[in-house]
Amino acid sequence: VWAIQGSNASMGYSTHAAFRFFGKFPPPVARRFIKELHHPSLGPVVDTMVGSGTTLVESSILGRKAIGLDINPLSVLISNVKVTKLERDQVEQTIDEYERHMSKGASTTGDISDYIPKDRYMDHWFFPAVQKQLAQTRLFIENIGPADVKNLFTASLAASIRSCSRASNNLGRMFLDPAIEPVDVCPIIVNRVRKILVGLEEIPDEKYSEARLHNSMEPLADDLSSNLVICHPPYFNVYKFSSIFKFEMLWTGFNPKEVRIDEVRESFKIGKPERVDLYVEDLLKSVRNTAPTLVKGGWLILMMGDTTIHEERINTTSLILRGLQSADYGLTLDKFIIRVPKHTEASYAAAQRRDGDQVGVKLFDHILVLRKR
């Protein structure tokens, strides 16, 4: 049994807090396995569902090479920004240019209508004046020259979308807060850029990690091998990331629908227990494609958890274990770890993982430590 000490805020060191990622892989879990199990001579740390880049950040801080894979291009962008050092003077100069650009107002920056995503709910979630400012921001970002600086501003825009919307803060799903007033976008973006810059001070100058676009249910590159692979999939009935980050994706030029069709099949907002078979099938397919990447004696860390639907417990972990046993991908369960969060989330995720009406998450995380035979 592991008890993760510390609040979400205390685990936001370095660039971990660059983007609020719901269902985030806890940094202490990544760090512990990297330090205890990874052998640099046997290849990079590999994360097959990199999410917001927790594994890459921890690997970089520890001086270990790492490769993160994800089907979502926004996740890939954010993860790369978190581990890419930048010249502060160059970024500050770009901030000055951005502030001058925004001070001109939408009427003097040309036609920006193409930079407002086409979505029928746009006016519901974003005030018209805020939409124009966000469009101005996109226009500016499109014309940034250095790719790494452009990526930093794009990630900062994505991380600022919730703060610029009419949605309540700190919730994965969006709920309209009628008390929210229109905001000034520019200072929100600038504050986020500078926050990421401060976090990057803890990242080594040498580039140890990178994220790549890849569907974990497809075979990994033939030349990729490692003794440590980490996978933290979305939990069944908690989040579909292309849905909860729909507007973050739209405002940064990505198409959520293109990602959604290939995501792990779960039951987000559907509430159908029978879909767990599809979820298990997809995760087993991911494990099957991951196993060949592991060297003999290598480790696969699979962190997941059960859930409840209509007060019925869905034992996803048990189903995965049975599937692994019957499929035989050359992996043996070495340890079964129960992770007990010290601080519970006041969120939709917690609501889906509580035991009845009791306060606090009662369905703990499960960490499967699998070894390659």
Image (cartoon, rainbow, N blue to C red):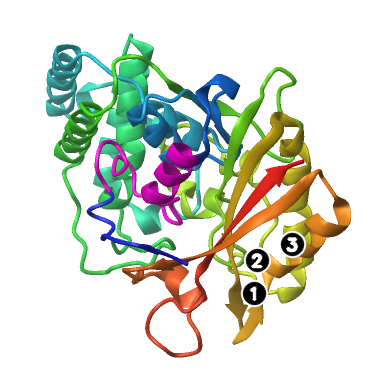
* Residue 204 image point, x, y percent: 29, 21
Residue range of the region highlighted in magenta in the rendering? 12-36
Residue at image coords 68%, 37%: 297
Residue found at the very far bottom of the displayed protein: 357
The image's mark for residue 125 is none
Residue found at the very far top of the displayed protein: 145
Badge 2 amino acid: Ser
- Marks 2,1: beta carbons within 8 A: yes
Q: Earlier in the sequence, mark 3 or mark 1?
A: 1
Viewer-nearest residue: 183 or 226: 226
Q: Residues within 10 Å of mark 1 (few under 14, many from 20)?
A: some
Instruction: Name the element at disc 2.
Output: loop
Residue 27 within the magenta-colored segment of the rendering: yes
Q: Residues within 10 Å of mark 2 (few under 14, many from 20)?
A: many
* Residue 74 image point, x, y percent: 48, 35
From mark 3 to mark 2, how far is it between C-alphas? 20 Å
Residue at the disc numbered 1: 271
Residue 79 within the magenta-colored segment of the rendering: no
Badge 3 amino acid: Leu
Q: In this view, does 313 lie above or below 72?
A: below
Badge 1 amino acid: Gly
Residue at the disc numbered 2: 267
